[in-house]
Image: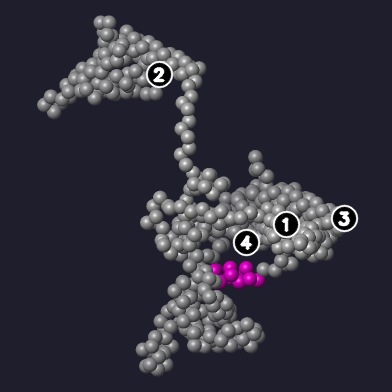
Amino acid sequence: MTDSTDSRRALDLDALAVGDRFQLFNFTRRDDHVSYLWVLRAMDRLRAVHRVQVDSEDVAAALRELAAAHDEVPQLDAALRNRLDALADDKIIHRLEDASRAGTLARYRNRQSVYQFSELGYRAFTAVEDVLAVRVRDVNLSRLVFSDILDDLRSLATANRGGDEDQVYRRLSRLDQVMEDMVRRSARFHVTLGEIVTSTEASPELFLRYKNALLTHMSDFMAELDRYLPRLDRAVREVEASGVNTMLIRAADADDRPFLSGIERIDDWKRRWEALRVWFTATPGSASGAADLRRATRSAVSGVIALLRQLTEAQRGGVNRASELRHLAEWIYNTPDEDAAYALTTAAFNLSSARHLGGAHDDAEQISPRATWWNAPGIEVALTPFRTGRQAGPGLPQPVRTDTGVRADLRRRQLEARAAEREAAQDLAGNGAHDRILNEAETRVLLALLTRALEARSVVAGRLTTGSGSDDTVVMRLLPEPKGSSVRTRHGMLHLPGFALEIVSRSGRTDG
């Protein structure tokens, strides 16, 4: 849906673009952030009546109208211009110069600025307003939306088969909006349910008051989802059978967004359709989004029932976290002296005295002297001072341990490797390096000899004449060859331009 599409686009932004967009929320971190919020609300009030570009006097008038209905609106007559300029610096609004608004020469010389929301700035403001407007009791799972989605899918297939371009666009747009709302509602519901489950110890009465309504709501949603999921899957496949590419082209042709090209509109509707399809149609190896939602809701029902059983048993037995803390407080209060109270508290909460450890960073110049300990990078501390508080020493030297078995095994493997190298070297001397494919051992020996020969090469008049390398078994010589030569190995071809290899056994046998 639109949320998932926007999330993928957000992942493509670089660090600089992300920093620029975070700057739009600077007003929320200022000391007088409430004043900035009311200024933006006043501009939004003017924007709602199609007054896009406004000056400070227009904003002040809108603030006075808001103050008549809300007591929290601050008085900003003298500082309003500074607030607007600060918002313009944060790029949440644009500041423009409008000479036509200057009625006098003095006002013209003093600059008459007008302000309007930037596109991203307005989105940042509405995002903040959405967060402030959220109420926990408003969350719910929209079970009645499945019938609307089914009707829209069937109408979409009919419109696509009939070639009704406008109807295809309307149905796809409605499906996109309905799915976005359903996904957002479901996510909010499960997040809120998780908060309720983790905070029941502080307010179990609130949970017990709404338990029946909560369980009924989730059960009805799952029943409706189970009833409609097979129908929705068939409806999606009917739409695909009517021609997905034709449908996307028709939706893009009817789409009137002027800043997108035809190809971009087709790609956008393709992403939206694929997101909708994944929600109701399972793919090989993965479940559909609706099936995942059903599984999460079923798990939430089990969690609520388990928590309800836990609270019921706690109330029946009279022992819970609150009663335990009350008993502990009574014990601490009745201790004979302050030392005994500290000892009991330490044992109950597993407290101990803090050990203060410190040290110097490897590169102290990289750390600002104004950095707090919370923001400064940490350093490595040995276990000895961490556990005992004493500085770690080098300790006594440990005796050298000899393991004759390991040494004997290592010696045996060395002898075997050396014997294999001798055998490979003898094969090279007997069969030559050309006109055949060398195995792994022969290749290793050849490369070692070639390295020694290149290191010992001689240069005459700027030209490489010859070079040789040897071990205790064979000797390799680099001989000038106008045509060059090549050696074939199991990993590919080794080319030697201008040279040929001659491998001579130290016993006198030679091959090239």
Tell me the residue that label 2 is attached to: 440
Q: Residue at x 28, y 9 (%)?
A: 505
Q: In the rendered view of the protein, which quadrant contains the N terminus?
A: bottom right
* Res 105 quadrant in image: bottom left
Looking at the picture, the colour scheme in use is one colour
Q: Are marks 1 and 3 in contact (CB under 8 Å)?
A: no
Q: Nearer the viewer, mark 4 or mark 3?
A: 3
Q: Which of 166 and 182 is in front in this view?
A: 182
Q: Which of marks 4 and 1 is in front?
A: 1
Residue at disc 1, secondary structure: helix
Q: Between marks 4 and 3, how big is the CA–CA gap?
A: 56 Å
Residue at disc 4, secondary structure: helix
Q: Residue furthest right?
A: 316
- Magenta part of the protein: which range? 121-133
Q: Can residue 148 be seen in this view?
A: no
The x, y position of residue 59, in whole percent, is: 53, 84
* Crowd class of label 1 (few under 14; some 14 to 19; many from 20; radius 10 Å): some
For this view, does 208 lie left or right of residue 358? right
Tell me the residue that label 1 is attached to: 344
Query: Residue type at mark 4?
Result: Ser
Q: Can residue 29 be seen in this view?
A: yes
Residue at disc 3, secondary structure: helix
